[in-house]
Amino acid sequence: MMRGKPVFSLWKKKGSEPPYLGQELAAQHCPNLLCSAAPRDSTIPNDMFSTLALAAALLSSDTDTPLELDDLQVTAGRYAQTTFEAGSAITVINPDGPGQEPPSVITDMLRYQPGVYVQQTTPGQGIPIVRGLKGSEVLHLVDGMRLNNAFFRNAPNQYLALVDALNVDHIEVVRGPSSTLYGGDAMGGVVQILTPEPRFEETQFNARVIADSAHDRLQGRASFSGGNEKAAIRVGASYSDIGDRRIGGGTTLAPSGYRAEAYDLKGLFQLSNEIELMAAVQNLEQPSTPRVDELIAGFGQTEPDSEEFFFEPNKRDFYHTRLFWDAQFSWVDQMEFHLARQTIDDNRRSRNTGSTSRRLEQNSSTLDGATAQFSKLAKSGMLWTYGLEYYADSVDSRRQQLDLNSGELSNVNARFADGSSMDSFAIYAQMEHWLSDRFRASAGARYSAYDIDIPAGDRGVGAKLSPDDITGNLSALYQLNTNLNLIANLGRGFRPPNIFDLSTLGERPGNRFNIPNPNLAPETVLTFDIGLRHSGNGWRAEAFAYVSDYTDQIVSVATGDMTPDGRSIVRSENAGEVRLHGFEIGFNGDLTDDLGVFGTLNYTYGKETTGGVSQAADRIPPLNGRLGLEYFWLRGSRWQVFSQFADDQDRLSDRDISDPRINPEGTPGWGTINFGVDFPVGQSFEVSLQAKNITDKRYREHASGIDAPGRNFIATLDYTW
């Protein structure tokens, strides 16, 4: 059976030297460029999947090892290889994979994946928690460029929801520190969203309409792609109207609905047989999204913190160019260059409960990035990946106060220090080498340097910081047999304090008020993991165990003072040390020719020590997972039944207990039963019907600010022409 969007795995050819590396080099690509191992013939379709199939056929022509279907990914080593060959713990998530529902926001696709848990404060946002770390402790990428910016919080935030969930080819999650290849913030891991690319000499129109009952949701997307052998273009637009959420038992939580509009444009240009240029634009705006936990009373509250709290608007603009050169010089085989600009607007309208003063905020980050990467397969069999990165981020921040009685509008202290900037430069290199027919080792190092400037402005005190760091990793892969690899990794990650950590001034969740602290040091994490990965005989499975030591954690610490309106004054400090350990299991396989099974199981344990006092770490997910069956039946239909579940989580930190999003007695365990079927209708239409949470269970995912949807019926119609 074919699940998701599998492509041919490039298996080792018997007697080849060195094992796999020729195949991995053949798979290196800028999507749509022919593999270097395949002949450059204009009669061959210039398409990634057909190219890989051709390369696999060429490389397996004299072997009796059957070709298996496996996912291709690019994030783990910054070049294309199958997940089976990767030396890291990695998950590839396809929008049409088992257990997936049409997503409202990106994080809907990440639920119940190995090593990942999702926190959602409000339906218009969500964050992945990877091995117990979250927010700016995890690096988020879109098509290879950073989404994390200078005011990305090390806590739940809304910025991943500003990437169009209906314009996703697939998502790749690397679990564990990846700072060698990706730099600061890649401590818990890397989440990379890869958007679709047009295909040369292919014309296609796609449309999708989604409706559901738990939100009165109506979503739609239309896209067109076309081109010839020299150029291809893809243009698309999406619209989402998400109503107030109905939770288990039939209660509707208001306000919790929002709208979003998005458009995108991407072009590919074949400048020569060796050079390809890509140019892209992405835009998404949520005009007015309520922050539910501020507007609806939570645990321990008799009234909500705010009478008004809306992200109004939140918006992301992204401009991106990429040049791929299959150079074949003596010092490099392939080169890849990126230039990008991302602007995120985080504007807000808020008013405390009982107050007659409304606050209006305009916060903006402009992030410019330039990267260059090179790869070389040396005669010794070593595969080298090395490169340079430069990012420059500037922050504009303003805030006004409107007296609702008098109508007077006045400027007040902004959320961030206006005019702050955060620039970074990095150089890195990684080497992979087969030391024997079965054993592959890799090692890498990166030097990162930052220049952070916070003007005194309305705070009266500024800061200039220049943190730098050297990070590295060691990885080993041992091939126990053709279908089973043993993998181990040791990596060090780090995160410099950003503008949010250093200069935030204003209200925080849990009736807190944050004051700036310009004297913070970087955080670091050291992680070891070991695991098994199987691919073959109709099964793909992996199991990893890990342990992480997280030092100099930046945490919010109470000063003991209160604001006039009763909020506890806090500020960020390098006060925490956290020990995390856990395991993650994922599998899918064939029970018969038509019946398959899939599942995940995740466990994380965290202990934090602050000021010599130990307690549970913040927002640690409970034991969680899913288990399901899928059956392929008449006329190409696919039927699924599955359960998603989580255990109790009553190991809470003091901050968890005081957080109105979390039950101070602990989050109860829960389980849901879900059903789905999708089937083609004629040559152009496909229909998908799903029934989620059939028993109408009322439950909350741990640390989320809103209960999960109750019984939900979802219908999706896809049209392709």
Image (tube, rainbow, N blue to C red):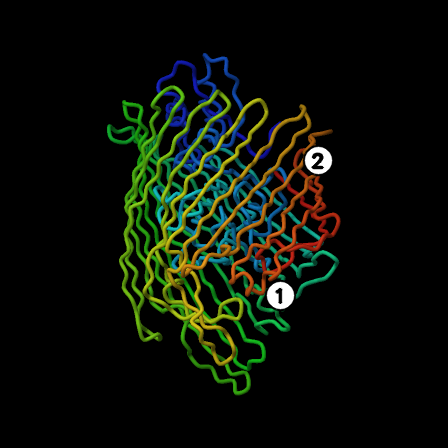
The amino acid at mark 2 is Trp
Image location of residue 630, percent across then percent down: 68, 33
* 56 relative position to 212: left or right: left
Identify which residue, 411 or 16, lies in the foreground: 16
- Mark 1 neighbour class, 10 Å CA radius: few under 14, some 14 to 19, many 20 or more: some
The amino acid at mark 1 is Phe
Task: Name the residue carrying label 2.
Answer: 639
N-terminal label among 1 and 2 = 1
In the picture, the disc for residue 663 is none
* 103 relative position to 61: left or right: right
Please report contact status of discs 1 and 2: CB closer than 8 Å, yes or no. Answer: no
Q: Secondary structure at mark 1?
A: loop
Identify which residue, 470 or 379, lies in the foreground: 470
Rounded to the nearest angstrom, the CA distance separating label 1 from label 2 is 39 Å
| Residue 705 visible, this angle | yes
Kindly give the residue lying farthest to the bottom in the view shown.
Answer: 406
Task: Name the residue carrying label 1.
Answer: 299
